[in-house]
Image: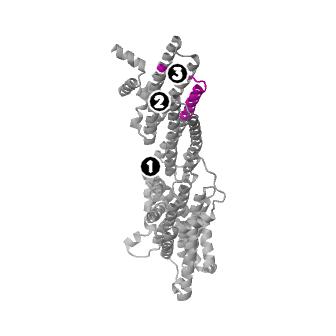
Amino acid sequence: MFGGLAFFLYGMNCMESGLSKLSGGRLEQLLEKFTSGKLRAVALGAAVTALIQSSSATTVMTVGLVNSGLLRLSQAAPIIMGANIGTTITSWVLSLSGIESDNFFVKLLKPTAFSPVLAVIGILFLMFSKREKKRDLGIIFIGFGLLMSGMDTMSKAVSPLSEVPEFTRILTMFSNPILGLLAGAFLTAVIQSSSASVGILQTLCSTGAVTLKSAVPIIMGQNIGTCVTALLSGIGASKNAKRAALIHLYFNLVGTLLFMVLFYAGNAVFDFHFLDDTAKASSVAVIHTVFNLSATLVLLPFSYLLEKLASVTVRNLDEEEAAPAAKEKLRILDERFLKRPSLAIEHCREAAVRMAHLAKESVLCALNLLREYSEKEFVRVKEMEEMVDRYEDELGTYLVKLSRSALSTKDSHELNELLHCIGDFERIADHSLNLAEAAREMDQKSLNFSAGARAELRVYAGAVRDILELSMKVFEEEDAGCAKAVEPLEEVIDQLSEQLKMRHIKRLRAGTCTIELGFILADLTANFERIADHCSNIAVCLIQIAKNGMEVHGYLETAKHDEAFEQLVEENRRKYELPQMAAQRAKGE
């Protein structure tokens, strides 16, 4: 029996894992985006749960989305209710094993008839297919085969128990509503899956020793026991995430209480004789479905009361400290999502895009300081640089944890790209602070560049601003084609750096510039050049990962000998030509 249970639980785990990978995070993203109406949210929660075969997984995911601020508490409540409906699908699939008929086509409906065929197809996909989606489908088929094999093994193992009086006596104890409810809650809390515990009950029904009087309270208890997973996931989360987990508990507690009171009050008045009938797998599926549908229909209009009850339980007496903006936005990197790699990668990209925008904004702000210094703006650059540092720490750590998960090829490429790029974003922000400090030094010492040097710096800063805008756009839109325009511009920025150094030496000899200003100018050009280098790294990384390669130097050597590359370099050279050199060229022409 325990061997069968092991196959059953592992098969369910395989199915959930395969379905999750096959969906590529799309199901989870739907939970984020399409929860505007209560009925839609219920339907969505039910659909996602039916597909991934786990109400606990959907609820934990919802708690994580609330914790990261992607869902409001009011949106979470109907999703959780829908998850309870979606989990009943498993019991209906398992109930097919109880079909009895001599008709050949009806026999084919029994999972034990077709699950071995699916398992064979699954193993063929897994062993011989190169396509990742087919391999994921293979895992799902194998999982289903294992699940049904485990169910069949358990049924055969427990069938002799129907002749054991002690076993029948134990099951009769559960006809007591309180004992039955506690037994169902305890079993589900231990294995942390209502679908699995319902499956075990359906297996016990095959002995013929389980009556409906025993089955009803056990099923009620199973709905309460499944809340344990969500409650555990709420530990250490934000107050709203804890409230979301409590909504799941209160929904099942209130629903169970109402059902038990009404059902047993009706039994006292009308004496339900059917309770003494033998429970079947299909009976369990019916009771499970009727309860969850009824509870949702009754409590959905009053979901706001469940929210209030959860808010009263988790109060704001010790008001959470106002978290800095970076901390609030980094809540999206919730460890609950590590079990859903596709969704976690999506959230990592979202955080990396925010980091990229911060790095870009810090440089643009620093460039403005060079034109007109402001202490307030200097502090802003410093704060942005610190926020970018925090992003790198949190995001880098999260990505390393995520790299240990079973990732699809697409997700693996995405993870590599993010790991490479976040270091460049952090360095860009560092250089923005260096530029801001140079501007501050000039303001404190009342230093000013000559008119010629200012004009040249404007051209150089314009080129840096443009390469920064282009690189961030390339990263955000994952546009490998547009990325090819970054390196030619970086080449021109390198040339501008050399030209500015030569122009400064001429002004130094002419006495129109000082040594002190020369040091500052060298510092500025070095930082401009480094920013452009990091922009180039981002673009090249994107191009190479799109080609499934990471040989950066090899790519650059090849690209620089390309005619299109040379043409782009020449176009940028003319666009960012220094004023004096443009005048000399015009005079020569």
Q: Which mark is residue 265?
A: none
The earlier-in-sequence mark between 1 and 3 is: 1
In the image, the segment drawn in magenta is 427-452
Circle 3 residue? 449
Indicate the colouring scheme.
one colour
Write down the quadrant of residue 446 in the picture: top right
Mark 1 or 3: the one toward you: 3
Q: Quadrant of the N terminus?
A: bottom right
Q: Residues within 10 Å of mark 1 (few under 14, many from 20)?
A: some
Q: Is residue 431 magenta?
A: yes
Give the residue displayed 43% in from the left and 60% down from the top: 118
Residue type at tag 1: Glu
Determine the main secondary structure of the stretch shown in magenta. Answer: helix
Front residue of this view, candidates 215 and 392:
392
Are discs 2 and 3 less than 8 Å apart at CB?
Answer: no
Q: Position of residue 340 (x, y in %)?
A: 52, 53
Dot 3 falls on a residue whose secondary structure is loop
Residue type at tag 3: Phe
Give the residue displayed 55% in from the left and 56% down from the top: 64
Circle 1 residue? 132
Front residue of this view, candidates 482 and 524:
524
Are discs 1 and 3 less than 8 Å apart at CB?
Answer: no
